[in-house]
Image: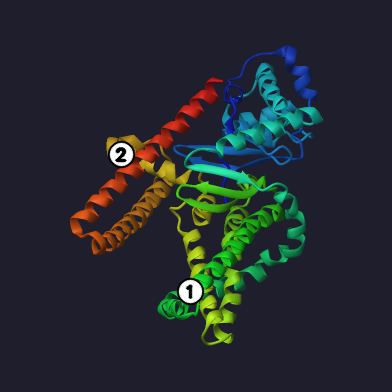
Amino acid sequence: MTAVNGTETTDAANAAGATETTDTAGADWLDHARPKLRDAVHVGPALLKGDQELYVVGDRETHAYLKVGAREAFLMEHLDGRRTLSDIGAVYAERFGKRLAAQHWQQLLGLLSARGLIDPAGEEQLARIREQAAESRRQRGRSPLLFRMPIRRAVDLVPAVARWTGWLLRPVVAAPLSVVGLALVVYVALSWTELYDAVQASPSRWAVSVVAFVIIWSVLACHEFGHAVATYRYGGRPTEIGVMWRFPLLAFYCKTDDAVTFRRPAHRVVTSFAGIYVNLIALPFFAALWWWGPESGWWHGLAGALLLFGAVAAVANLIPVLKLDGYHMLEHATSTMNLQTESFKFLGRLIKNGRRGIAAYPSRGRFVYTAYAALAVAILGTALVLLVRIWYQTLADLVGGPGAVAILAGEAILVALFVRWALRWQQRRQQASSGG
């Protein structure tokens, strides 16, 4: 699953943060105007990004999103078609200590109308916004490090799939099934050698591995539909389901941008967990073949391979530093945006300027970013040391110690050069897009 990214930031802050002025000519229409956001437009909860809070506004018809500040979000939430602008202005003044003048209301409403957020909006305007949003997603999903290829009409299957499988997300069903799946992950960890030996002892290891890979790949496709069904269940709409290249992996993906507009953190977390949940509920079927199927031979080896691959896939998705489901669950649980990037920015400011460099951060932000940075360094550092050690030992057995060191150094240089080139390529593309 991928979260909302690259959303537009509105410049309505100048209007929402304006001080009170005298404008008697505009008093009449402020007393009578009752603008209303379209029913498809939803203002999300406050999300911490760096030292400020942002709100994502999502249009579930056009799949266009923008980020706004607290003042704009407050005003938009009150545009319900019942209260006049004067009524909203009075409540706004109580909250923020400032009242909006008529020209500032005109500026704000003009911006919202131009984006098709105010009711009514013409079909031609919405179609244009929908196409612009789709093109923006396509452009963001193409780089040497990231390439997304949506599967045509895949999202159209979601309502039907949700009708048939939505009951699996009911807490009374999901909780025990998740516990069973997690228990099987523990079982796989404790029985790793036995399972691996069964795969090795199967008559055709290559055939077992290929069949197991195809089955797990199919489970991963269902994994993405799990995210889509959860999004649909809570009122959102997935925008894309497809195949994604994200250096150095090829995998399925599902864009569930609407999740960040869900008011309840639990709904956002469940939307991210739903994919892992699919992995977990597949494990009992593999375990049944392992326990009650043939005790040796090809089928026994296949059961062992499925349990190994299935458990690894579930655990990998839970790791909170890989920007997979576990990472997004943590983002939603902490109500943060770009948690990993902002945590390392926070750490950099702390190292460079000490406490003075992080003085602008709220106490919640300091706690969350410190905790995540420590967790990420611990996990990534440990993984890097283990990976280098295992790869060094493998190379040393083949070419000797000096040769292994030379190969590792060469690989590190090549990877660093590739990543540097890819990042510069992406930066130039963004600059060209902004300039255009």
Q: Name above or below for residue 27 compared with residue 281.
A: above
Q: Which mark is residue 205?
A: 1
Q: Residues within 10 Å of mark 2 (few under 14, many from 20)?
A: few
- Determine which residue is flagged by label 2: 355
Single out the mark in the foreground, 2 or 1. Answer: 1
- Is disc 2 placed on a helix, strand or loop? helix
- State whether residue 69 is above or below residue 299: above
Query: Residue 6, percent across and down?
Result: 55, 36
Where residue 170 sits, quadrant-wise, is bottom right
Type of residue at label 1?
Arg
Residue type at numbered disc 2: Arg
- Whole-percent x and y of residue 285? 61, 76
Q: Residue furthest left?
A: 402
- Dot 2 or dot 1: first in sequence order is 1
Observer-nearest of 373 and 181: 181
Cα distance in 3D space between marks 2 and 1 = 57 Å
Give the residue displayed 53% in from the left and 87% down from the top: 295
Mark 1 surroundings within 10 Å by alpha-carbon count, few (fewer than 14), some (14 through 19), many (20 or more) = some
Q: Residue at x 66, y 71 (%)?
A: 173
Q: Quadrant of the C terminus?
A: top right
Which is more toward the observer, 429 or 43? 429
Q: Is residue 61 left or right of residue 349?
A: right
Q: Position of residue 297 (x, y in %)?
A: 52, 83
206 sits left or right of 370 in the view? right
